[in-house]
Image (tube, rainbow, N blue to C red):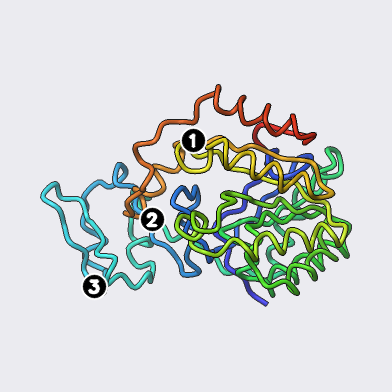
Amino acid sequence: MTGTCFNIQRYSVHDGPGIRTTVFLKGCPLSCTWCHNPEGMSRELELIVVQDRCVGCGACVEVCPNPPVVDPGGRSVTDRRSCLRCGSCVDVCVAGARRLVGQPMTVEELLAEIERDRAFYEESGGGVTFSGGEPFEQHEFLLACLRVCRERGLHTAVDTSGYAPRDVILEAATLTDLFLYDLKLLDEARHRELVGVPLAPVLENLHALDEAGAEIWIRFPLIPGVTDSMDNVNALGRKVASLRTRRVHLLPFHRTAADKYARIERAWEHAGLEDVAEDRVKEAAEALGAMGLDVRIGG
């Protein structure tokens, strides 16, 4: 069985307990306007171009089956409407300005990469976290990896939006030690508008996991003017307070994704936003803490 990964991040300390290896799987059914991994949205390979590295040698133009437009400065600009994502331009780019994001891997190949850091997991109480994109978009591959991890005694976490078939999520619960469960907007209309999918299945799956006894850490991104209203914070607090789990991680907005959008030549709706104010984070944390929740900043 083969899956498509777009990054394997080693020595991660923000995706579950201990030192972890985070595996990012491509593909996501959501369309969050603030997404920090836009290169993981599509299941297809993604061409990334770092224009600052381009030396204008023209080698990519010569090998491209559908030649890109060349701007007046001599740097190649890919016409993504005709790009085949064949990798020809990547192979000849001496400056390393071009690369394809997305690597097909078998379960065995991926587990070999994960096992390289077993010593760190054992010393720190860490393990492997499957993220994305949305890892359940490749649920057959994900479940196969979780089974092998369970057989090898590796601690597993799944970072998910919760938007997936109920039976698949519950099957994963039998193989997963921890769910990092994203909640963003607690208003149905706003959720459909800004996340791109209905809210109801997300909440229903959360309740199903909670009733099944799964360990869950709620992740709540604080996006200025989008998710950080106190109405939304309080609604999230009330929802979590109705569950067995009590742990909420606040994830303050930051601008580190700006370069990613530029490299895939996609406009970012939140390019003008500043990082969320510390006072706002503190206010949200205090409101949630007053509801009896275990609130952490980041992670």
Asked if 57 appears above or below 237 in the picture, the reply is below
Judging depth in this view, the residue of 186 and 14 nearest the camera is 186
The amino acid marked with disc number 3 is: Asn
* Residue named by callout 2: 48
Rendering coords of residue 99 (x, y %): 41, 57
Judging depth in this view, the residue of 159 and 226 nearest the camera is 226
Per the image, label 1 sits on a secondary structure element best described as: loop
Asked if 279 appears above or below 269 in the picture, the reply is above
Q: Earlier in the sequence, mark 3 or mark 1?
A: 3
Per the image, label 3 sits on a secondary structure element best described as: loop
Q: Where, quadrant-wise, is the N terminus in this rendering?
A: bottom right
The answer to which image quadrant residue 143 occupies is: bottom right
* Residue named by callout 1: 254
Rendering coords of residue 183 (x, y %): 63, 50
The amino acid marked with disc number 2 is: Ile
* Residue named by callout 3: 66
Report the disc number at residue 284: none
Judging depth in this view, the residue of 236 and 175 nearest the camera is 236
Mark 2 and mark 3: Cα distance apart in space:
17 Å
Q: Which of marks 2 and 3 is nearer the N terminus?
A: 2
Rendering coords of residue 19 (x, y %): 75, 40
The amino acid marked with disc number 1 is: His
Pointer 2: residues within 10 angstroms few (<14), some, or many (20+)? many
Per the image, label 2 sits on a secondary structure element best described as: strand
